Amino acid sequence: GIQVEQSPPDLILQEGANSTLRCNFSDSVNNLQWFHQNPWGQLINLFYIPSGTKQNGRLSATTVATERYSLLYISSSQTTDSGVYFCAVEAGTYKYIFGTGTRLKVLA
Amino acid sequence: DAGVTQSPTHLIKTRGQQVTLRCSPKSGHDTVSWYQQALGQGPQFIFQYYEEEERQRGNFPDRFSGHQFPNYSSELNVNALLLGDSALYLCASSWQNTEAFFGQGTRLTVV
């Protein structure tokens, strides 16, 4: 089955810093999403981005489907950005496969 | 729009018991999927329901079963609970097989 790898696994930033999270996948995908999981476990939709580039405030994402990777950019990070970021892909099997996540901690 | 709602939010069960978790999808969505998330790991796909049928199943034993009702809501049933079934159970809904939206989860503890 399709493999999803995220890097880095852990990231500590000072408030105001920028960061880039990466998601590599091993096969063509139909759907790709980025989520932020808050401390209470809720998965919050950030981007639905099987290809192309999108922006939403301080966050933006780019998926290069032909090269099988996606990037999530966080600019001017805030303490509320802390949590786990997941990339999830669906490759025609109706199930999303999640990466292992990037654990982000933003220090005040 | 209420989004995806799950109940209960927390649950404690004893080994060997059975449990039923419930999910109401986001308005306009017709597809419901269930995921299990163990501590420190990413969510793992259990199964997906569409048109009241199980359309796809992950690598979970038959102790895990489900149902989808005509109003698209869904239940996840787990029989003969094991300690290893302790996890956060997440429900996701989507229209057809596009962007998935997740509920807040049910945290199950088996003692």
Image (cartoon, rainbow, N blue to C red):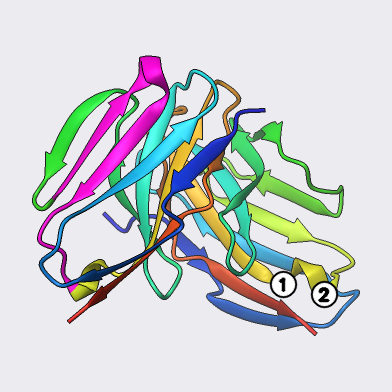
Q: CA distance from mark 2 to mark 1?
A: 6 Å
Q: Label 1 is found on which chain of the structure?
A: B
The quadrant the C terminus of chain B occupies is bottom right
Specify the label residue B86 is tagged with: 1
Does the magenta-highlighted stretch encompass residue A76?
Answer: yes
| Amino acid type of the residue tagged 1 in the rendering | Ser
Residue at the spot 58% in from the left edge and 79% down from the top edge: B10
Quadrant in which residue B104 is drawn: bottom left
The quadrant the N terminus of chain B occupies is bottom left
Q: Label 2 is found on which chain of the structure?
A: B
The residue that disc 2 covers is: B83
Asked if one can make out residue B108 in the rendered structure from this viewpoint, the answer is: yes
Looking at the picture, does residue B16 appear above or below residue A87?
Answer: below
Which contiguous range is marked in magenta? Answer: A59-78
| Amino acid type of the residue tagged 2 in the rendering | Leu
Magenta residues, dominant SS class: strand
Contact, mark 2 vs mark 1 (Cβ under 8 Å): yes
